[in-house]
Image (cartoon, grey):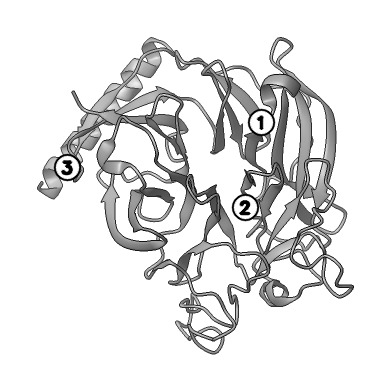
């Protein structure tokens, strides 16, 4: 497809979306894009969101969406966006900070509990924290809020808060944490939460089988370390293993299988280089005691959001790992052979928007949070 033709199609699609948005919240704009498995229909499910960060599907098909400035909203199947829910705590809405990931309790149908991560303001700066709360859909609010985890350090600054939340099959909660950029060396410090993945119980206590439990020199919540800024995480649907991806600097974005007690190298072992000078960071890209990535992107794509596809709508995609790109405005589909990444297909590049989150819907469609347009996109096979 010629570049000029792609631009004309994009302008036409955006114009239709704007017109339909003015006509009513339930209207949908559609376009068709190409993929290796056949044409894909891309529809706009909802619009009018500000910096949407995370999406969780409620049992009735509605969506719970976080907006980074500090709002939770309910989005109906018809695309109608609710007023902000009451009860959300104050967030540090600076740079990459704010209201971040949101997930449902594994027993949500019984307890109506949600968990969310946020940049919590402090006297000295901010820290990534996790709270649990009761979701009162009838009253359009959250209540019974309790902060169950907070990083033990709170540097000033605007960068690298993480943070994704994933429940494992035993009901424990993984929390991914950035190293706040200015504190990169802390990623190797086992007395710090910066640059770590931690694993806690839903009440904030520490599981007895965490890898460093019993060591006095290590924070017992820590599951793995040597991370830069992890903004994608998901359980493999078959193995139950935690997969993550993290931002590198100039080069070296990584996809990892997150193993208990493992060191992932940052900032000593990395494929990345310094932004301004281009100089190599650390001592190289390989070391025997550092777990190597399953895949790495150089140049960086600025990955965000992660989902394994297991639905029936796209047979060709089953078993694939999807990652959104903030930098290149595309959706990366990684083909896997066991634990190995064997191929990449880049989708939606003609749209060119920052894709913040990726989720598989209950009907097998793929849903994306378009940060650039403040919208929710739905991918289905073109008819």
- Callout 3: SS: helix
- Callout 2: SS: loop
Q: Please give the residue where the numbered disc 2 appears in the rendered image.
A: 95
Q: Label 3 vs label 1: CA separation? A: 35 Å
Q: Label 2 vs label 3: CA separation? A: 32 Å
- Callout 1: SS: strand
What percent of the width, then of the height, locates residue 79?
A: 46, 17
Name the N-terminal-most of marks 2 and 3: 3
Q: Label 1 vs label 2: CA separation? A: 16 Å
Q: Is residue 192 positioned above or below 360 on the image?
A: below
What percent of the width, then of the height, locates residue 45?
A: 41, 23
Residue 351 in view, yes or no: no
Please tell me in which quadrant of the rendered image residue 63 appears: top right
Residue at image location 50% in from the left, 68% down from the top: 248
Residue 36 in view, yes or no: yes
Q: Please give the residue where the numbered disc 3 appears in the rendered image.
A: 6
Q: Residue furthest bottom?
A: 283
CB of mark 2 within 8 Å of CB of mark 3? no
Residue at image location 54% in from the left, 48% down from the top: 235
Name the N-terminal-most of marks 1 and 2: 1
Circle 3 crowding by C-alpha within 10 Å: few under 14, some 14–19, many from 20? some
- The numbered dot on residue 71 is 1
Judge from the rendering whether residue 3 lies leftward or rightward of residue 286; answer left or right. left
What percent of the width, then of the height, locates residue 135?
A: 73, 22
Judge from the rendering whether residue 298 lies leftward or rightward of residue 347; answer left or right. right
Of residues 54 and 255, the one nearer the viewer is 255
What percent of the width, then of the height, locates residue 271?
A: 46, 77
- The numbered dot on residue 350 is none
């Amino acid at each position: 497809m010629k570049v000029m033709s792609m631009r004309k199609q994009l302008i036409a699609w955006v114009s239709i979306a704007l017109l339909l948005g003015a006509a009513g919240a339930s209207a949908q704009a559609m376009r068709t894009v190409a993929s290796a498995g056949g044409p894909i229909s891309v529809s706009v499910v909802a619009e009018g969101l500000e910096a949407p960060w995370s999406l969780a599907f409620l049992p009735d098909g509605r969506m719970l969406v976080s907006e980074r400035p500090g709002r939770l909203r309910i989005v109906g199947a018809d695309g109608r966006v609710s007023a902000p829910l009451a009860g959300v705590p104050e967030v540090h809405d600076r740079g990459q900070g704010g209201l971040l990931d949101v997930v449902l309790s594994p027993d949500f149908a019984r307890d109506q509990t949600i968990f969310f991560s946020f940049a919590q303001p402090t006297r000295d700066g901010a820290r990534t924290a996790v709270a649990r709360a009761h979701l009162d859909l009838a009253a359009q609010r959250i209540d019974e809020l309790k902060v169950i985890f907070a990083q033990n350090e709170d540097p000033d600054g605007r960068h690298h808060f993480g943070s994704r939340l994933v429940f494992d099959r035993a009901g424990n909660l993984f929390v991914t944490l950035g190293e706040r950029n200015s504190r990169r060396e802390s990623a190797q410090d086992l007395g710090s939460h910066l640059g770590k993945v931690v694993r806690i119980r839903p009440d904030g206590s520490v599981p007895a089988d965490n890898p460093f439990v019993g060591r006095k020199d290590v924070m017992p919540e820590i599951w793995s370390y040597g991370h830069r800024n992890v903004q994608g995480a998901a359980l493999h649907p078959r193995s139950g293993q935690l997969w993550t991806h993290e931002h590198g600097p100039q080069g070296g974005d990584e996809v990892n299988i997150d193993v208990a007690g493992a060191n992932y190298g940052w900032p000593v072992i990395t494929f990345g280089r310094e932004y301004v000078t281009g100089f190599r960071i650390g001592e190289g890209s390989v070391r025997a005691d550092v777990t190597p990535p399953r895949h790495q992107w150089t140049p960086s794509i600025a990955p965000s959001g992660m989902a394994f596809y297991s639905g029936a709508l796209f047979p060709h995609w089953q078993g694939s790992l999807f990652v959104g790109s903030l930098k290149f405005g595309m959706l990366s589909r990684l083909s896997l052979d066991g634990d190995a990444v064997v191929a990449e297909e880049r989708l939606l590049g003609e749209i060119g928007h920052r894709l913040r989150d990726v989720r598989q819907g209950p009907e097998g469609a793929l849903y994306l949070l378009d940060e650039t347009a403040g919208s929710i996109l739905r991918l289905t096979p073109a008819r």
